[in-house]
Image: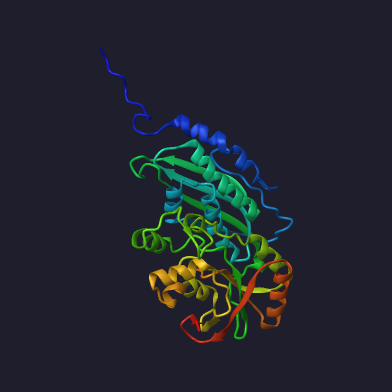
């Protein structure tokens, strides 16, 4: 008697579950499609037509990123419908800093095993993020790797491509002494510093994700899973009206790492954070962890997700304009000659 041969499913990979997942995500993908999309889900690659009438000398701008250990909170809560929005934000906000308009996005999900409903929820979040960013989700990949990931776990990575006319590229080279720095409000932690956050709340303080926290006005898990803000719409509006000299996405490394990245050599950002309305989550982290200010501003966005540099004469007008469209913005500093990249006044 012969024995039954081993199958791919016996090794932990369920091809039929993959097909089911693709069927479930089709509607999510479809709602992101914009004018330039020339392909549909299921092909080997995504096609996108550049509008050469609008962009005479088009420059493509690309970025890639993941969500980091914020994913651990999604596992803990078994809530997967917003983490994809984080992934889009982390990529798109980076390419915005060069003045690019997001065109399209691709995602990659590596997982222990494909659970179609979970994959669908993840992609739903990605699609919602793409809609907010004004870009199309034109492709992606889901890889089932039971020998790499633990049961119930997955990783999520994204790739964004945008476009900017050559003469509209924002590279920070025109920034000069006296230019002012304007901060745009964040939605909370975004997707950075979660290794510290998880250690503090779950290992040291023994919180649960479902624990209601008075200072936050919500459960800890709901606060931690607030999606990273996508700035595409407001940045496009600013660029239509004002000359922006530089932009910085306040991501991993906080103020200290990211603001100097937009400055030319020989200049320093002189920052005053005393008047920023810092969200309660940062205050709670600082208090419980007894964390010093420099560590906080080196790790988190502290309530400012994007910083733009404009001419001093435009500073007040930009703030007034942002206020008129319901955008909370702060004049957080100015550019001076000097070394070291950044100086922050906390008190």
Instruction: Locate residue 233, reporting x and y percent.
Output: 67, 60
**Residue ID at (58%, 74%):** 172
Measured along the vertical axis of the image, is residue 249 above or below residue 120?
below
**Residue ID at (49%, 47%):** 79
Can residue 42 be seen?
A: no
Q: In this image, 85 relative to 211: left or right?
A: right
**Residue ID at (62%, 80%):** 180
Residue farthest bottom in this picture: 337
Q: Nearer the viewer, residue 5 or 24?
A: 24
**Residue ID at (54%, 72%):** 278
Instruction: Locate residue 52, reporting x and y percent.
Output: 71, 55
Q: Nearer the viewer, residue 159 or 150?
A: 150
Instruction: Locate residue 204, reporting x and y percent.
Output: 34, 62
Q: On the rendered image, what quadrant is the N terminus found in?
A: top left
* Quadrant housing residue 177: bottom right
Q: In this image, 250 relative to 208: left or right?
A: right
Can residue 307 be seen?
A: yes
Instruction: Locate residue 178, reporting x and y percent.
Output: 62, 85
Visual colour scheme: rainbow
Measured along the vertical axis of the image, is residue 138 above or below residue 2?
below
Q: Nearer the viewer, residue 75 or 47?
A: 75
């Amino acid at each position: 008697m012969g024995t039954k041969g081993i199958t791919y499913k016996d090794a932990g990979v369920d091809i039929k579950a993959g097909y089911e997942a693709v069927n479930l995500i089709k509607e999510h993908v479809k709602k992101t499609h914009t004018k330039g999309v020339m392909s549909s889900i299921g092909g080997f690659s995504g096609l996108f037509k550049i509008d050469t009438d609008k962009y005479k000398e088009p420059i493509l701008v690309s970025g890639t990123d993941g969500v980091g250990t914020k994913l651990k909170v999604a596992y803990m809560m078994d809530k997967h419908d917003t983490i994809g929005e984080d992934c889009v934000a982390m990529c798109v906000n980076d390419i915005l800093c060069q003045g690019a308009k997001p065109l399209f996005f691709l995602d990659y999900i590596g997982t222990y095993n494909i659970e179609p409903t979970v994959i669908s929820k993840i992609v739903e979040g990605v699609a919602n993020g793409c809609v907010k960013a004004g870009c199309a989700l034109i492709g992606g990949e889901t890889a089932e790797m039971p020998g790499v990931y633990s049961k119930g776990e997955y990783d999520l990575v994204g790739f964004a491509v945008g476009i900017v006319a050559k003469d509209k590229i924002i590279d920070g080279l025109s920034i000069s002494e006296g230019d002012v720095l304007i901060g745009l409000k964040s939605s909370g932690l975004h997707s950075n510093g979660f290794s510290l956050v998880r250690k503090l709340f779950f290992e040291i303080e023994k919180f649960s994700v479902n624990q209601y926290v008075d200072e936050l006005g919500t459960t800890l898990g709901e606060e931690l899973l607030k999606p990273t803000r996508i700035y595409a719409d407001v940045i496009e509006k600013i660029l239509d009206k004002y000359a922006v000299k530089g932009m910085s996405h306040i991501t991993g490394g906080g103020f200290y790492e990211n603001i100097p990245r937009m400055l030319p050599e020989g200049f320093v950002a002189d920052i005053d954070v005393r008047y920023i309305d810092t969200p309660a989550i940062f205050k709670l982290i600082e208090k419980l962890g007894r964390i010093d200010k420099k560590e906080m501003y080196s790790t988190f966005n502290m309530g400012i997700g994007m910083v733009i540099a404009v001419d001093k004469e435009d500073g007040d007008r930009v703030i007034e304009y942002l206020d008129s469209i319901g955008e909370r913005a702060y004049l957080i500093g100015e550019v001076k000659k000097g070394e070291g990249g950044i100086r922050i006044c906390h008190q």
